[in-house]
Amino acid sequence: MTKAEMFSTYVLPVLAAALTALAGFLGTQLKALYRRWVDDKTKEAVVRTCVRAVEQLYHDLGGPEKLEKAREGVRQMLKEKGISISQLEMDLLIESMVAEFNYGLGAESGAGT
């Protein structure tokens, strides 16, 4: 058996299988990273929407009641989209969005005075 026959019989199929496996692995990893990125962006958008809605609809409620309304909205919207979120992540995103919202209001009201 010549080197060329040996290469085409044994090495080439093994190399092709290894490259196929590598491409499949990289594809699944990229898909997982993309899915995580999309889920994170969706969570941020949902929290932003819920915080703004709670501020508009329930402005007469106190802080703890508004927080619970925002939590309910976030849970429901993400559940409909099939995205899970931990309590800690949800609370941190809500608090971050509330701070952003309050800072934006403070900057606007402070500019005219």
Image (cartoon, helix red, strand yellow):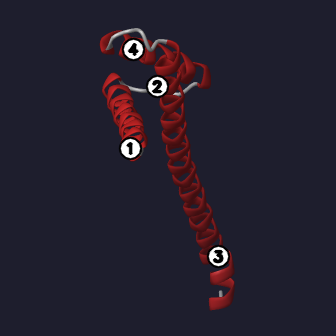
Q: Determine which quarter of the picture holds residue 35.
A: top right
Of 40 and 67, the residue lying toward us: 67
The answer to whether one can see residue 86 in this image is: yes
Among the two numbered marks 4 and 3 on one chain, the one whose residue lies closer to the N terminus = 3
Q: CA distance from mark 1 to mark 2?
A: 18 Å
Q: Is residue 45 above or below residue 111?
A: above
Q: CA distance from mark 4 to mark 1?
A: 22 Å
Question: Looking at the image, which residue is at 48% across and 29% down?
Answer: 47
Left or right position of 58 against 12:
left
Q: Position of residue 90 (x, y in %)?
A: 38, 27
Quarter containing the N terminus: bottom right
Q: Which residue is mark 2?
A: 51
Residue 12: image tag:
3
Q: Is residue 8 above or below residue 55?
A: below
| CA separation in Å, label 3 and label 1 | 66 Å
Residue at left offset 68%, top offset 80%: 8
Q: Is residue 71 above or below residue 92?
A: above
**Mark 2: few/some/many CA within 10 Å (<14, 14-19, 20+):** many
The quadrant the C terminus occupies is: top left
Give the mark toward the camera: 4 or 3: 4
Q: Amino acid at mark 1?
A: Ala
Real-space Cα separation, disc 4 to disc 3, in angstroms: 64 Å
Task: Name the spot of residue 106 as percent of width and height, x first.
Answer: 36, 38
The residue under the point 32% across, 15% down is: 63
The residue wearing badge 4 is: 66
- How many marks the image carries: the answer is 4
Q: Secondary structure at mark 2?
A: helix
From the viewer's perspective, is the residue at label 3 or at label 1 nearer?
1
